[in-house]
Amino acid sequence: MRVLFAASEGLPFIKTGGLADVIGSLPKILKENGVDVRVVLPMYKKTAEKDRANFERVGSCEVHSGDIHTIATYYKTEADGIPFYFVEHAGYFERDTLYGYDDDGERFAFFDKVVLEMFNVVGWMPEVVHCHDWQTGMIPAIAKIHYANDEAMQSVKFVYTIHNLLFQGIYSADKLWSYFGIPYEWYANGTLRFHDNCISYLKAGVVLSDKITTVSPTYSQEILTPYFGEKMEDVLRMRQGDLSGIVNGIDMAVWDPATDKTLTENYDTGNWKAGKAANKAALQRDLGLREDPNVLLIGLVSRLTTQKGMDMVINRLHDLMSGDVQFVVLGSGDKGIENALKGMEHQYRRRAVFYCGYNEALAHRIYAGSDLFLMPSAFEPCGISQLNAMRYGSLPLVRETGGLRDTVQPYNQYTGEGTGFSFTNINADEMMNCIRLAMDTYYFHRHAWDQLVLNAMNKDVSWNTSAVEYHNLYKQLV
Ligand code: ADP
Ligand code: GLC
């Protein structure tokens, strides 16, 4: 079985969020299951500067598509036994950040086209192309329209995974021609049309792929409703028979408190109390918090956006800080949220810290050093952070949505079961009540708390089960 993953980011090369975690970890387990899986990514500036010299140049192709006339070069390398291909184009990709440019639509149109041109150049033809998120949504459309007479290409199957329905790649209808050279009839007949005068790359992926998945069973149901559907619910309902939810896992080698080199002290379920205490003390020391082994230390590592429930957190900061807690936040995003968190740090010196930015090592240290991990998302397709937190024995406190609902078992005070805490509605009072329950458990029912930590650390957050589900999906197609 030959499968190509096409995505806009992936570890160990480039990451802005959970998508990169998935692209960096799932292929490894698929490979263990006997799949010949390879990955193709754009070569961004960071990768070009750091790694290009070590990559093998494997060829190039000319692109003539609509108004795009240029050349792409392919590079290849291997990471943990997985072949990675890179599409090099300095003008489109060698920029300071990955996304957020006016020409993102053109950049990823180019990428999608170049992914399909790659097979002949590198001499490897996948049986399944597995596309991820809006950036790769047009790949099946290009394959069906521009390669209509190419027998080999018509036998390729497409799987499309939605990691976040909020981002869809919506552009004006004229771009169908100027970016892709696709005739107007594909808009006019409705296939690639998205509401008034627009196209959506994500819709194209949903309509023209053979199977559609999203990253948790609950999210696969939620997106069929107007509240979560982002105006795509009707299209998704039409494809419901081919839509499924497969929950994410994490890279158990990268996220392992027993071997993690960024930690002050390594630990596992046998010595977690001493291990977490040492990491907590180090975190407090490094961040200028009061060194106190007994205080409940709450961690939050996230994009700072409405999706992540940050409005509720900001609204109740003072409530939260009125309890006997310390609070460490790592992330960046909306300026209003960042400013509120800067204010918090100022007001609650030695009790609250906001590290504004992206910091891989600090993220690991927060998972290890915190007791509770706050993730009250308004919606969450899956979430990787709560999985990391459980693995590191920091109990996630989440809202019951998407993958959070599917992966965190809420504390049951009567049976003692659970791997974290959860609340139901997007409601700051509910969130605060849940935080109070966590505080009460931590301070007054330590035995129950300790059991939850063990449950969380013992929970299977690996890819083992889900990789088999993806493999079975490919088998259905080939
Ligand atoms: P999303 O992809 O929606 O942002 P996920 O929970 O799926 O959310 O994945 C987020 C990933 O990015 C996790 O691995 C988390 O540890 C990491 N992460 C998020 N923000 C930061 C940050 N500021 N610094 C370091 N790592 C971060
Ligand atoms: C998206 C989602 C997140 C998910 C990640 C990887 O970024 O927001 O919930 O875990 O993709 O699938």
Image (cartoon, helix red, strand yellow):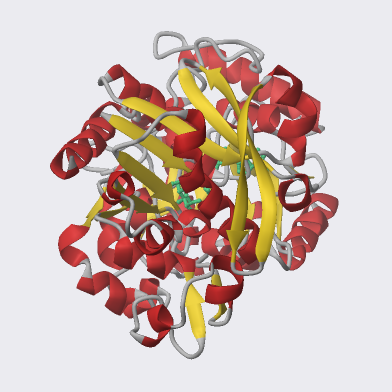
Residue displayed at 26% across by 44% down:
412
Picture quadrant of residue 338: bottom right
* Residue 86 visible, this orientation: yes
The structure residue drawn at horizontal position 40% and vertical position 83%, both measured from the top left corner, is: 185
**Image point (72%, 52%), residue name:** 92
Q: Position of residue 327 (x, y in %)?
A: 66, 44
Of residue 97 and residue 205, the one placed in the foreground of this image is 205
* Residue 439 placement, left or right of 313: left
Task: Tell me if residue 76 comes above or below residue 297 in the rendering.
Answer: above
Q: What is the tally of numbered marks visible in this picture? A: 0
Q: 101 or 179, which lies in front?
A: 179
Residue 215 x %, y %: 35, 49
Q: Residue at x 48, y 91 (%)?
A: 196
Measured from the top left, where is residue 71 in percent x and y? 68, 47
The image quadrant where one finds the N terminus is top left
**Does 361 sit left or right of 197 as displayed?**
right
Q: Position of residue 417 (x, y in %)?
A: 24, 36
Q: Is residue 231 left or right of residue 264?
A: left
Q: Quadrant of the C terminus?
A: top left
